[in-house]
Image (cartoon, rainbow, N blue to C red):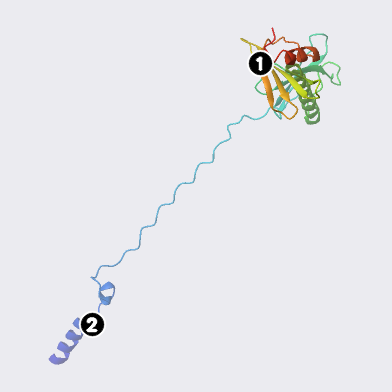
Amino acid sequence: MVDLIEQMERAADEAPTHGAAAHGGTGAVASEPAATPAEPEDDVPEDDEPALIQEDRVWQGQGWTARVIKNDDDDGWAVAMIMDGEPEPALVGPWTMGRDKKNPKPLDTPAFHTLVKTANEVIRRHEQQLHARLHKSVRITLEDGTAVNVKLVITPDEDDPYATLTATEEYGSELASVRVRPDFKLSQASAMEWIEGGYRKPR
């Protein structure tokens, strides 16, 4: 009986243990890597742009603001079209009276689109007129058949306005360029006189 008990004890001591020691480890249990904390989601940027006003007498959009105002010339109403960033209206025109014959007709999307189209056309015509006033040119044909293009470009500087008179060949090569008074009158005669004078600065 004693021998049987001793054999059982020895068998228990020699039995492999569970876990890391059973595989030749040091007996320490391997720990799983710690989970990386989730990064907070980026805050969605808020839209800082102010909401467009679209009311009966004020309507905004497409870079313009339409504002219905009292017509100073009579008892009616007018509409002013103001481009974004500009202090003064680009266009002021009469506005339709409402059904009650007292208050102005409310602004709406179709009416605003028509106003924007009209205002853009006014701006475009103004820019074309300004360009034509500041840029003039004539074409001179010399006795030998050579063509010379003479251009006058006015720079309307508030402190020091001036103009530049330039002569170029038919294919664009510059022949001469001088600075002249902003009120210089360019014509066929004055251009020919400048050319015949050796492109000297006009008096």
Residue farthest to the front, as pictured = 144
In the rendered image, the vertical position of residue 95 relative to residue 63, given as above or below = above
What secondary structure is found at the residue carrying circle 2?
loop
| Residue 127 in the image, given as x and y percentages of width and height | 74, 21
In the rendered image, the vertical position of residue 4 relative to residue 64, given as above or below = below
Residue 105 appears left or right of 8:
right
Measuring 25% from the left and 75% from the top, which residue is drawn there?
A: 24
From the viewer's side, name the closer residue of 110 and 16: 110
Measuring 27% from the left and 77% from the top, which residue is drawn there?
A: 22
Measuring 60% from the left and 31% from the top, which residue is drawn there?
A: 49
- Splitting the image into 4 quarters, where does residue 161 fall? top right
Q: CA distance from mark 2 to mark 1?
A: 110 Å
Quadrant, the C terminus: top right
Residue at image mark 2: 15
Any part of residue 15 in sight: yes
Residue at image mark 1: 178
Residue 143 appears left or right of 63:
right
User: Please, what is the three-letter code of the amino acid marked with disc 2?
Assistant: Ala
Which mark lies nearer to you, 2 or 1?
1
What secondary structure is found at the residue carrying circle 1?
strand
From the viewer's side, name the closer residue of 121 and 111: 121
| Residue 184 in the image, given as x and y percentages of width and height | 72, 10
Quadrant, the N terminus: bottom left
User: Please, what is the three-letter code of the amino acid marked with disc 1?
Assistant: Val
Question: Are there few (<14), some (14-19), or many (20+) residues within 10 Å of tag 1?
Answer: some
Residue farthest to the left, as pictured = 2
In the rendered image, the vertical position of residue 20 relative to residue 128, given as above or below = below
In the rendered picture of this protein, how many numbered marks are placed on residues?
Answer: 2
